[in-house]
Image: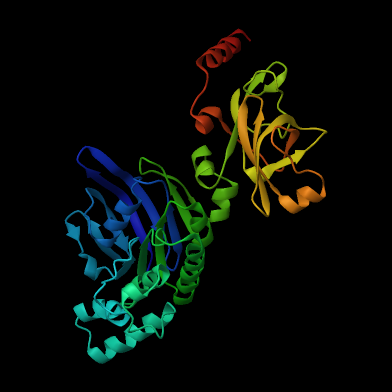
Amino acid sequence: MGGIRIEGLVKSYGARKVLDGLDLTVEAGECFTLLGPSACGKTVLMRLLAGFETPDAGRIVIGDTLVAGTGVHVPPDRRGIGMVFQDYAVWPHMSVRDNVAYPLKIAGIAADVRAGRTQTAIGQVGLAGLEQRMPSQLSGGQQQRVALARALVSKPALLLLDEPLNNLDANLREEMRFEIRELQQRLGITVIYVTHDQEIALALSDRLAVMDEKGCLRQVGAPDALFDRPADAYVYRFLGVANFIPVRKSAAGWRLPDGVTEWVGPLPDREGGHLAAGFRPNDVALSRSGAGLPGIVRRASFLGAQTDYLIEVGGVTLRAATDSRRAGAGGQLFRDNEPCRIGFHAVQWFDELDATGTVNAEDVSATTSGAGHE
């Protein structure tokens, strides 16, 4: 089977347009993640792919088959798709075996063939030996494995996973995300995974797409490319904890929002008089003296291997994270209200309006006026 092509997809509910001309290509055998906030259109796109909804315009091609387009709507059971939902959706009155076998039974598959394929799917998700158990006798992770086996038993070429790990605790989420990735690679199946959790997206994906609240794709690419080279501040912010320090250009250099503190760190690599330095908490290097921005630790939180800080500097507050053992050995662990110096391992530059959503109107006017007199 080939990949998936989505071209000019439009979907509205009343006056609200959820998707507006969306284009996307997913390669065969790829684990592709749609990452975005709640209500951004991720699940709507999955329902359109599965055939539960019809687009208002545009087309969807799965492999070489047009499954949705003008005058065309291939029903869900003829698209060769398996789907796993957030709420498991296992039937409480059926055993593990009967839950997994149900799609084959509905399809009229012979009993002997059905039994073999059911057992294979159960084994693929690590539930061998639990075939006779009822859902009430299973943990949340085991129930999600039942749902996954049921989606795989029909040997789909495309597997849609809609926030399937949300109802699991943190340890199970971590365990299951690696199991899903290993299973996808072993079977060579194409997977489209929907989530708002950037850790899951980064761990699972061959490629991922970041969607915004308007249903637009802000950037598509490999996880490391989006993390290290975000297209804009929205993508940077969505892929982890992000700090932004606005800086303004003056005759004396770059100043922080208090108008007094001078920026000390990598210089901007882009044009503009109103920029923002973006960096992650672990990009911050803290010291007690020497070069760097002068700051005050407003909160120090020991979290075991890591110590998390809330630091005030130049009229803004930022987060920093350090390795507790390494910092302790070097005498660089700070307490609340201690002064510090702030350096940077890495900084990315953005337009201030893009990063913070606000630019002072008087400053913009002054900058524009000053430029006119040069």
x, y percentage for residue 324? 72, 50
Res. 167 in view = yes
Q: Is residue 274 left or right of residue 176?
A: right
Q: Quadrant of residue 165?
A: bottom left
Of residue 89 and residue 154, the one placed in the foreground of this image is: 89
Residue 141 is situated, as x and y percent measured from the top left of the image, at 42, 69
Left or right, 204 with reference to 277: left
Q: Is residue 214 left or right of residue 183?
A: left
| Colour setup of the view | rainbow
Residue 93 on image: x %, y %: 24, 75
Name which residue lies at 54% across and 16% down: 364
Residue at position x 27%, y 56% from top?
A: 48
Quadrant of res 291: top right
Left or right: 352 as drawn, with respect to 21: right
User: Which quadrant of the figure has residue 94?
Assistant: bottom left
Residue 89 lies, with reference to residue 42, above or below; the image says: below
- Residue 107 visible within the image: no
Residue 52's spot in the image, x, y percent? 23, 59
Residue furthest to the bottom: 112
Point 75% across, 34% down: residue: 340
